[in-house]
Amino acid sequence: MSDASQHWDPRDPSGAAAAPGSGRGKPPGKNGENRENGPSGGSGKKQRTKRPRRTGWRRAVPTWRMTLGTVLGLALLLIGGFFAGYHLVDIPAANAAATAQSNVYLYNDGSVIARDGEVNREKVKLSQVPDTVQHAVLAAEDRDFYSERAVDVKAMVRAGWNTVTGKGKQGGSTITQQYVKNYYLGQERTVVRKAKEFFIAVKLDREETKDQIFEGYLNTSYFGRNAYGIQAAAQAYYSKNVEDLTTAEGAYLASLLNAPSAYDVVAHPDNETAARHRWDYVLDGMVKEDWLDAAERAATRFPTPGEAKASTGLSGQRGYIVQAVENYLNERGILDEETLATGGYRITTTLDKAKQDAFVEAVDTNVMAKTSAEREADRNVRVGGVSIVPDTGAVVAMYGGIDYTKQYVSNATRRDYQVGSVFKPFVLASAVVNDSTTQDGRRITPDTVYDGSNKRMVVGPQGPTGYAPANEDDVDYGDITVRTATDKSVNSVYAQMAQDVGPGKVRDTAVALGIPTDTPDLTASPSIALGPANASVLDMAEAYATLADHGRHGSHVLVDKVTKNGAVIELPERTTDQAISREAADTTTSVLRSVVEGGTGTAAQAVGRPAVGKTGTAEEDKAAWFAGYTPDLATVVAVMGQNPDTGAQTPLYGALGLPRLNGGGAPAETWAAYTEAALRSSPARQFDLKPAPGSAEDEPPVDENPDGSTNASPSTRPTTAPPGTTPSPPAAGTPTPPGTDTRGPGGTDGTTGTADSGGTNGPAGATGATGNTGNTGGDGDNAGADGSGGGFIEGVRGPGFPGSQPV
């Protein structure tokens, strides 16, 4: 070979590619050969191209080798974990839920209220359960049970993801897993329990048939009303054996598995919509799976269950208390109903035995003793009551009804009756909180004057609203202060005040005080002042306790301590906040004091110590309320009308032998009797009030006439003189500007008033007529004569002798 053929170009120090034809810059071939120029020379070592280093964002991306290794490692770990768990976890013996203990409920002094947990279970064979009932349960809980494996991994992952992402806790368990949880494990929500449930379900599915597992599930599931198993549920809800259940009834029982007590439409009539929705879901699922004919589905009607048949151990008030405590523990997230149903818990309540007994005696004396078997209306009388210590929120007494074994629904916690005028103080409190003014710009205080005329149209910023509420008994009150309107519970004044404050703001204040946001008919409109909302007695007691505690609100407390096998269950700590200003709460309290001292609630004076309160009557007199408090105790009493056969709400006309039953009667009397007994051993305390500055208007005080009317101008008519002053009649012949208020002063005790000035260039108006005596006191309210070409001027009001006022 020539020298030229063996010559190598010197290495380019810059690392640049070789000139064309030199072979530089090309990757080597096999065995170190240059792909173009043959075997490499030099030392004979192989030439290797150095792998370029990963830079920038590529460094954060794992290579395919790393990814594959990670996936294989995780797969091996999961497979190893599965086999280890499968061999380590055995099918255990039945858990304690199969032989549940009783729970013990105690007063705050440790004395026993009641014991429950007496397990109501009767096992049946799967063959005894009608196919339609079986299909209903499958449609509700696990439609692919007979075709799927014991564990639905996809459903578990989906449920976990929905829970983590805030879509709510959702079940991902098959019927097999639920049966394992019910019979072999427990209701606690832990990773360890879920892992055990997984492996036991897999093993059980290999050792038992689907029919055996389904039969066990139907016999161990909890349906509410202390009923374990489908047979016990059939008896508890429909008083029949499981073999006799209809398709509709089976679908309802299947619906209960999702939320046993919440979907009991008898115990919780306010949840009927949700229960019906779940029932529809079950039936529609049966149609979808071809288990039910569409025509039969269309003809199926909701099967309202019967009243619960409580054990005699829960008679009297005991059953209502147990029911309320169970709801409290469940709603607060302390113990759900299935966990509580396993038994063994000692639950110390805040209830005071002496006060509880006093409440029962007060109701018996002032209501039940006045009923008669000969009066049809007395069959409909129901009573509910709750008493709360304002500064601690402790519920110390609760009256749910005449007897839990005779009337299952608690009148203390039900939310299906209007609260009536006991809602009105929330309007006044909201006015003070928001520094509200009338339509003509006057600040709303207890001494602000409104027009209390019957069926007076509520006026808004844009003019008449179309809402003109009637006062009770259609009484015309004329111009009266807010304080007087509260004393007499004047609807026309409070509806206008709610409009002036802003119905939305009134609603916000009520919620801040303790009325639940989801209370039925808590609608932001002027009518909110009249109490169409369906809050419970317990809700109202909590709100009034907030007023009593100077505007500080904290949720009511019903349970003080819970233990099981000596271990203490942690309870949430009660916190309080200043829901409304102290000035607003105390101003409201000062006004409510006059309701007891001389308004519709004078019967409450029998308590014999400083007290405040408000009466209320629901539409058509279907309920009568008294809500009040002393510095030590806030208590609400309601008497309700309900047909014992149909469950329909009924008016209280004729009940207790009275033409009408209102809040100032039996409810106020019961309140006074209970409160006096409950506080008998405590010294009387005065209210420590700090009402809002300027609670009385800055103008001179309003002069009220004997019937409660005043000469000041109502909220919708601008004042031309300070409230309480009466303009002097102009001299004869002096022109009077059109529209000027020139009414003469009212006559004393119904005597003839002085002459009014007529309109411009018109004759003088007629004198006010002599007031008439009577139940409400008459007033001479004749209009002045219309002078030719002059304005129309009202005549003078000649008030009559005050008489008894409507309640």
Image (cartoon, helix red, strand yellow):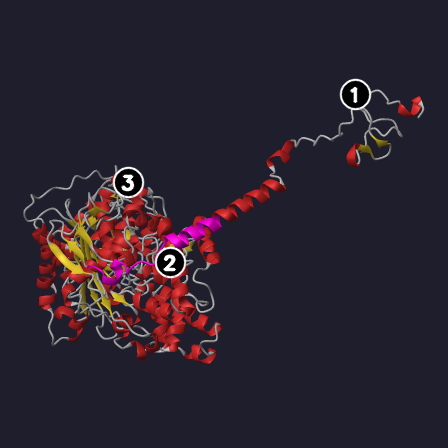
Marker disc for residue 200: 2
Inspect this view and state whether residue 665 appears. Answer: no
Q: Position of residue 192 (x, y in %)?
A: 36, 49
The answer to the question of whether label 1 and label 2 lie on touching residues, with beta carbons closer than 8 A, is no
Secondary structure found at label 3 = strand
Kindly indicate the quadrant of the structure image that contains residue 369.
Answer: bottom left
As measured in the structure, the alpha-carbon distance from the residue carrying label 1 to the one carrying label 2 is 71 Å
Q: Is residue 100 magenta?
A: yes
- Residue stretch rendered in magenta on the structure: 78-101
Marker disc for residue 2: none
Marker disc for residue 578: 3
Closer to the camera, 385 or 18? 18
Kindly indicate the quadrant of the structure image that contains residue 213.
Answer: bottom left
Secondary structure found at label 2 = helix
Foreground tag (2 vs 3): 2
First along the sequence among labels 1 and 2: 1
Q: Position of residue 370 (x, y in %)?
A: 10, 68
Closer to the camera, 102 or 91? 91
First along the sequence among labels 1 and 3: 1
Write down the residue under mark 1: 14
